[in-house]
Amino acid sequence: MSHPAGPASGHSRRDFLRETVQASAVGLAFPTIIPGSALGLSGAVAPSNRVAVGIIGTGNQGFNDIRSFLEDERVRIVAVCDVNRESPGYWEGKIGGRDPAKRLVERHYAAERRDGTYRGCEAYVDYREILGRPDIDAVEVCTPDHWHAIPVIAACKAGKDIYCQKPLSLTIAEGRAMSYAVSKSGVVFQTGSQQRSDWRFRRACELVRNGRIGALKRVRVGMPGGRTDYAKVGDRKKPEPVPEGFEYDLWLGPAPEAPYAPARCHVNFRWIYDYSGGNVTDWGGHHPDCAQWGMGTELTGPVLIRHAKAAFAPDPLWNTATDYSFEAVYEDGLTMLVSNKEKMGVTFEGTEGKIYVNRGELKAEPMSLLGSKIGGDGVHLYRSDNHFRNFIDCVLSRGPTAAPVEVAHRSITICHLGNIAMRLGRDTLRWDPRTERILGDDEAAKMLSRPYRDPWSLPVV
């Protein structure tokens, strides 16, 4: 497929913007948003000077993220990609796919033009066509979990900056390879763990890190259970003909061969272990991630998974845990309890109080803790108030993002280990966070990775 002619090299444009941002950000602790006036424009960033973005995966979250990127005047979405042309079967039965995503983008940009038309967004089936375009600076990978590692590593090799939705990986081995690829290539990487750009979570974690609840003893992490039929196709689990316009074999990719069924794909993929880890990993990129932020264990992990218990409701297709509970124990004895029976959110318990945080909620015992001042010599965590703008800030400044790949890898590792223990019926697993090895259990150790279906393989980094 031929590519439309674009402006000068994406890297040249990005370098120009970066130099402008860096010149205007001298003495600032965080990257700034580049104003149009700095570019000699009247209140806007010229289309030829915007960061060119390609979206890989235009289903549920992909559509939401497209809207978020469209709000940033420094961004120009020039390509979208999905193996599905257009169909229902997404959130609440809504329509998704590459064609409606293309229409969404072009309608938005058409509104900026005097003639009300725009045709500058290309739609692709294969992510490799996006990665092959030299005019694209950054990509978002918003595919099902089993399709994160391959395009992320390929994007690193292509020199594209990356926004990748959570959970980072399908397996611990994939996460390690992804983190290494990002480090080796030097690309900017943001994980879609957007709670790190929520002031409530940042404030809760800062208070804990500064000892406002005394010595931290225990963290309780509550996440959803069950298997919600988000797409309203849960009654269609038997094999059906593949719909026209859906490249189902490419959707399966490295996952095992399996017959098509509407309840297998799109939003409900997360209830099938071949493609995801159920709610354990679907929410594992959120609450356990923020728990680690408050614990100060972002670049390490537990040494023990214990008391792992799960229920798997019988089902002809969906096989992830419906109820679950496990504890992650750290070298210093600190314990994180993860369960769908706990209160939704994160509760930090210390010797002198506790702090609870969830989306839209921040509470403490005593409540006076929330007004505590943190001085200049205290721990001040990374501040971001908009996850998508933070990514673009860092594309321009080349600074670290709010949710780096290594931090995301360490967080989701906890949940992968929990799933391994629960699926094998292990009460306990021993883990070495330095070597990232399961100790004394060969069967469990084999589950750190999964075989890929031919002809797919994890790219060598």
Image (tube, rainbow, N blue to C red):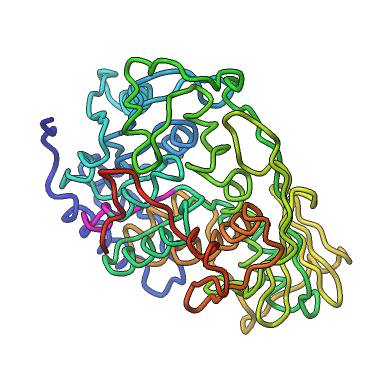
- Residue 198 shows up from this direction: no
- Percent across and percent down for residue 178 are 37, 60
Residue at x 81% of width, y 57% of height: 363
- Percent across and percent down for residue 238 are 53, 20
Residue at x 31% of width, y 67% of height: 22
Residue 22 or residue 380, whichever sits in front: 380
- Percent across and percent down for residue 397 are 33, 63
Report the magenta residues as a range: 154-164
Residue at x 62% of width, y 81% of height: 376
Residue at x 29% of width, y 66% of height: 186
Residue 267 or residue 403, whichever sits in front: 267
162 falls in the magenta region: yes
Which quarter of the image is occupied by the C terminus?
bottom left
Q: Is residue 162 above or below residue 108?
A: below
- Hey, which quadrant is residue 411 in on the image? bottom right
Residue 189 or residue 369, whichever sits in front: 189
- Hey, which quadrant is residue 176 in on the image? bottom left
Which quarter of the image is occupied by the N terminus?
top left
- Percent across and percent down for residue 396 are 31, 58
Q: Is residue 281 above or below residue 3?
A: below
